Image: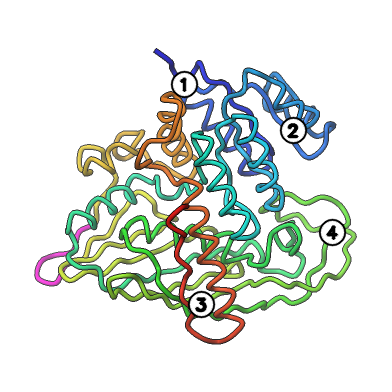
Amino acid sequence: MTHRSDIGAAVIGSGFIGTIHIEALRRIGVNVVGLLDATPELTVTRAAELGLPTAYKSLEDLLADDRVRVVHVTSPNELHYSQARKLLAAGRHVVCEKPLSLTSEESAELVDLARASGLVNAVNFNIRFYPLNQHAAGLVRSGGVGDVRLVTGHYFQDWLLYDTDWNWRLELEHGGALRAVADIGSHWLDLTTFVTGLHVQSVLADLATVVPIRRKPTGPVETFSTARAAETVPVEIQTEDVALITLRFEGGARGAVAISQVSPGRKNSLQYEVDGSSSAVSWDSETPDCLWIGHRDRPNELLSRDPGLLNPMGRAAARLPGGHVEGFADTFAAHFISIYEDVIAGRPADKPAYSTFVDGYVEMLLGDAVAESARTGRWVDVARMPSSK
């Protein structure tokens, strides 16, 4: 029988997220055999720092390594499409960071390529895999809140508050036409559609760039770094810091979300509330081990994450006993366990528990509608994925 330790994986990119991928893979017993980074020199340095045996000189060098069955793509956004395309063509299973690509057309092509290949394909919408979000999804889908009527919330961060804050995601050519919406808003949209089981039908969006000129450092900067560069150049910003989006879900439910990367004091607060005809559920990523459950005619509940108290979906994602907080990095491990079950089987399940390239494509279609709505000031229908996809 094949075990996760028999599977060789490689990771492209060793920044904040790439390092978490490597740590999570090691935690679940996958054999991480090598790394590819932005330059051969950086790859050698980071592979040594992370204790990885192989530093690949290029993607072609990586693909020549027969030990590698799965590749995790955590490179800058503009590289996702080309790298995922080559990996699928070379017969490798692919786990890609979001966004899946910079355009919905590219994402549609990757969906078709992945389906034709029969290979496991996943997009890392890891926030689904907080145990209480899995529990909430099971609760809502089993009728535990009644009919879903209203879905509200926010995703707030403060790491781009100052005009001296900089990251490659701020540059249109590297991050894409949408920034706050694509970077963090996509997590909120994916999570709430997962929890409710409802797709967004149309959107009304307002986007704003509240820091129009930023001072770009002349040297490299790490994501979430608070260091101030000595030398900078002024750059006009063309992507949004803030977004307000009103939503219409299938079945008649309504929703609204505020997204911001310039909210002081909010380090990483993804919050949602799902209001149903009988009860409600609410969760915040900054207090991830608590799920609020609201009632009209009896006391409200505050459910602490404890595998013994969770439904089967929540229990399957929990890795630690109650009272031992599970956080952001733990969701990667839970997500990857789900993905690697299919890697061991050799192909995707009929209904994968994890988010696939299809989910990544759906988020691109949502982004297209948000951008068009912000441009026109009108409600815009979200394009439906073609039935062949």
Numbered disc 2: secondary structure: helix
Position of 270 with respect to 213 (left or right) is: left
Q: Earlier in the sequence, mark 3 or mark 4?
A: 4
In the picture, the quarter occupied by the N terminus is top left
Q: Report the Cα–Cα distance between label 3 and label 4.
A: 30 Å
Numbered disc 3: secondary structure: strand
| Magenta part of the chain | 295-301
Residue 167: image location, x then y, percent: 73, 57
Specify the amino acid type for callout 4. Answer: Pro
Foreground disc of the pair 3, 4 = 3
> At 64% across and 21% down in the image, what residue appears?
33
Q: Report the Cα–Cα distance between label 1 and label 3.
A: 42 Å
Residue contact between numbered discs 1 and 4, judged by CB atoms under 8 Å: no
Q: Earlier in the sequence, mark 4 or mark 2?
A: 2
Q: Report the Cα–Cα distance between label 1 and label 2.
A: 23 Å
Numbered disc 1: secondary structure: helix
Q: Count residues near mark 4 (Cα–Cα under 10 Å), then give few for <14, some for 14-19, many for 20+.
A: some
